Amino acid sequence: LAKTTQPISMDSYEGQEVNITCSHNNIATNDYITWYQQFPSQGPRFIIQGYKTKVTNEVASLFIPADRKSSTLSLPRVSLSDTAVYYCLVGPTGGGNKLTFGTGTQLKVEL
Amino acid sequence: DAGITQSPRHKVTETGTPVTLRCHQTENHRYMYWYRQDPGHGLRLIHYSYGVKDTDKGEVSDGYSVSRSKTEDFLLTLESATSSQTSVYFCAISDPQGNTGELFFGEGSRLTVL
């Protein structure tokens, strides 16, 4: 499975847009890019998934360049409640795969 | 929220004792997983199951065994607990018929081995 690299931590202020980039140089043709969010004392929660170009849902956007060797999770107008750890995963969909989460990016949002 | 229940939620035990953590789901999802989470390591896959009686090892399986005799239950056993197995354990499930292969996680089980 493709290995991912993310920044360990990021700081932001309320109302700003936050972009978290994930590097996955050896992504395979059938791999998708999925982001999860984890709050303290809770299990991770699915945010968004994409294969190429741009995907947007009610909470985030995911930008994937043509070579798919990186991806950027964009959180518009963050609030204090967006303080969490964000994980980038790369692998096939459909379950049953050895998906590993890595250390993720700790986002801290301040007033 | 996905119907996933982990038990016990908290446990303190002594080195050398056996420990079993239970994950119970009401979603009838085929795939189930056990992860452990430690500071500085993120979540690491211990074992997973792709059906009743079908299991496979993850990246940190040493010292752990699993069993899945029913679709809804996935048990993680530490035959002889060690202090290095002090961690938070998360169970997850996924549906192979789903569009994204999204993982749904339980609330976690905090294990302390003294």
Image (tube, coloured by chain):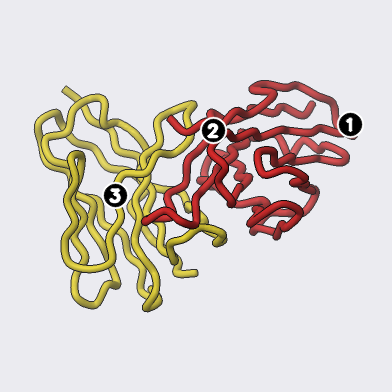
Chain colours: A yellow, B red
| Disc 3: host chain | A
Label 3 environment density (alpha carbons within 10 Å; few <14, some 14–19, many ≥20)? many
Considering depth in this image, is A102 or B75 the residue closer to the camera?
A: B75
Marks 1 and 3: in contact by CB < 8 Å? no
Q: Which mark is residue A48?
A: 3
Foreground label between 1 and 2: 2
Q: Do labels 1 and 2 share a chain?
A: yes
| Disc 1: host chain | B
Three-letter residue code for mark 1: Thr
Q: Are marks 2 and 3 on the same chain?
A: no
Per the model, the C-alpha gap separating discs 1 and 2 is 24 Å
Label 2 environment density (alpha carbons within 10 Å; few <14, some 14–19, many ≥20)? many
Q: Which residue matches tag 1?
A: B17
| Disc 2: host chain | B
Per the model, the C-alpha gap separating discs 2 and 3 is 19 Å
> Mark 1 falls on what kind of element?
loop
Question: Could you tell me which residue is drawn at 43 percent across and 29 percent down?
Answer: B1
Considering depth in this image, is B40 or B53 the residue closer to the camera?
A: B53
- Residue B56 lies, in percent from the top left, at 70, 60
Q: Which residue matches tag 2?
A: B106
Marks 2 and 1: in contact by CB < 8 Å? no
- Residue B106 lies, in percent from the top left, at 54, 33
